[in-house]
Image (spheres, rainbow, N blue to C red):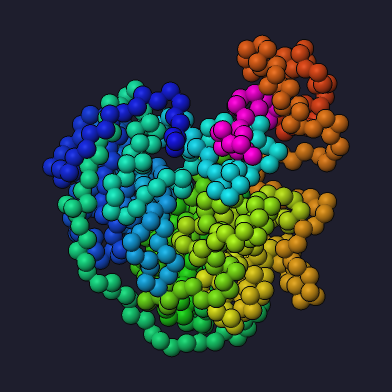
Amino acid sequence: MMTHLSENAFTLKVQKTNDDIANIIATAPNAELIILPFYENLESIPPNLYDTLNNFMLKGNENSVFLLFTSPVFAVDYCAQLPEGIHYKLWIAIQTEFKNGSANGLKENHSALLVFTKYKGSLRHTKTRMAYTYCPACSKTTKDYGGKKHLYHEFGTLLSDVWRNISFKEGEYPAQIIDILKDLFGLKEYECLNVYDNREMYKSTLKPRIFKPFSDKINIPDNSEILYNGDCIRHLKSIPDNSIDFCFADPPYNIMKKYHNFDDGIDIKKYFEWCDSWLCELGRVIKPNCTVAILNIPQWCIRHFKYLSTILDYHDWIVWEGLSLPVRMIMPAHYSIICFSKGKPRNLPFSEEKYIKSFSNNYCLRPNCINERKKQGVNDSEYITNLWWNIHRLKHNSKRVDHPCQLPPLFMLRLISVFTSENEIVLDPFNGVGTTTLSAKMLNRKYIGIELAEDYHNIAALRHQELSNGMDPFRKIANNIPHSKNSRVARLIKQEYKIDKKTLQLEVKRIKNEIGKIPDRKDVVMYAKYPIEYYDSYFVDWGEVTAAARTTGMKEYKENYQP
């Protein structure tokens, strides 16, 4: 079965070599893939490798795309030192089966495919889809598309920057990855996908890990169940050294989100200077052997790595497949939780098995299928790894409050379960509406939450009071319509639909098939069975009106399935 489908691709010839890239100047415009070993720590990386990679790319063709396949620890360190003239484009996390698990953390489960260019501007590639995968128990797609199947393509979904539907094992030749890349970059300007397998050339030096020395003195904060309203750096400075068991931060990303009392679009240099200030404080207050975890997009986590590696020790790169808005042809799904410890990290995870186990990623999450598997005694669960795929964003208003970027409760319940034990202290300097501190309290942890915006702080305080009164602060709230939104799409007024939106969209698709083009408003007025007022009132824009007409629609069951 095909794993992918690329539109208008000129499939590239693949030329494989084991020659050292140090001896090659790639002057022709091509896709250049370099395969490196999966280094376990920074100490094991050959000292000359960074210069070799830089020279290879800087001397290469201006229009080429350069791909680097390796381990996350090497990927982040290399990106943090990227020279001028090489432009980071993408970090694709690829599900990988490793021979050995992590000695004191989550099982390693992903490798890094980095994409660089010498040219500025958007990455040039074909429109590529990944095939649907199907649950072995019910034979339906592993993702439940509900009533929106008419809006999806018959083959699969657009490629994202997290690849889980291909098979790759550590040490093998990445054949399926190469098959995708030769079509993804199958452009007329390229002739070849050159593959340089340099795993033997740049083998690990097998040096032991060296951790930074820290004082073992432990302090106790004055208050370990408190919500502060104010500037995070000011409040962090009041917390004693070596007093917190786990620090988590989900800071503003500086991507123009509408937060209260915070400009999420400041000068990038000022933004990272500010980030370094609170990161420094987190490094100071975290206890020896305990962990600081930062959630952000990969590009910003690379910059956080650059600073944190000067004060703490790298621990892990957890990938959260948290698909957000489809803003480009390779959809952004890779969100990173970069983890640093103060000295050697303690062994993980600690407790709450219900949160550190999940369904295997080849099974669907439909309640009926889950119940049937349970009846039949199917072993469909496993311990989580450092690739998190089954925690979905809060999309329904019934589970949202007034904040544009709420994390799903399961995300924080899992993270706190992994890194802490009962009665330990969890700190969040950007507590927002309280997801972190509420999760900590529900897991019998202590907490310190800091939030700048008074409105968000008040919501968090109210939710903590609800929890104290025996209410679920994460419950569904009927007819709830928050003012804040987590997307740029305008919210429609609440109204009764005389004809459902699916029927209206399929009617537009019928018109498209009749007239041979995507209908405009005049076409719908002329040919539709339904009044144009429905289309004007029920949809946010004309793109949504014509969504079904611009794709094929998909089936829930695999081809030739007989129920």
Residue 269 shows in the view: no
Expressed as whole percent of the image width and height from the top left, the position of residue 147 reads 71, 38
Residue placed most toward the observer, 188 or 512: 512
Expressed as whole percent of the image width and height from the top left, the position of residue 110 reads 40, 55
User: Does residue 483 lie above or below 286 as drawn?
Assistant: above
Answer left or right for 157 relative to 1.
Answer: right
- The residue under the point 81% across, 39% down is 493
Which quadrant of the structure image shows residue 187?
top left
User: Does residue 446 lie above or below 75 as drawn?
Assistant: below
Residue 541 shows in the view: yes
Query: What secondary structure is the magenta-colored segment mainly?
Result: loop
Residue 548 lies in the magenta-colored region: yes
- The residue under the point 68% across, 63% down is 433
Give the magenta-colored segment's residue range: 544-563
Expressed as whole percent of the image width and height from the top left, the position of residue 544 reads 68, 30
Expressed as whole percent of the image width and height from the top left, the position of residue 464 reads 73, 72
User: Outermost residue toward the left?
Assistant: 23
- The residue under the point 74% across, 51% down is 397
Answer left or right for 404 relative to 463.
Answer: left
- The residue under the point 44% across, 34% down is 2
Residue placed most toward the observer, 81 or 14: 14
User: Does residue 293 lie above or below 421 as drawn?
Assistant: above
Which quadrant of the structure image shows residue 378?
bottom right
Q: Quadrant of the C terminus?
A: top right
Q: Quadrant of the N terminus?
A: top left
User: Does residue 421 lie above or below 393 as drawn?
Assistant: below
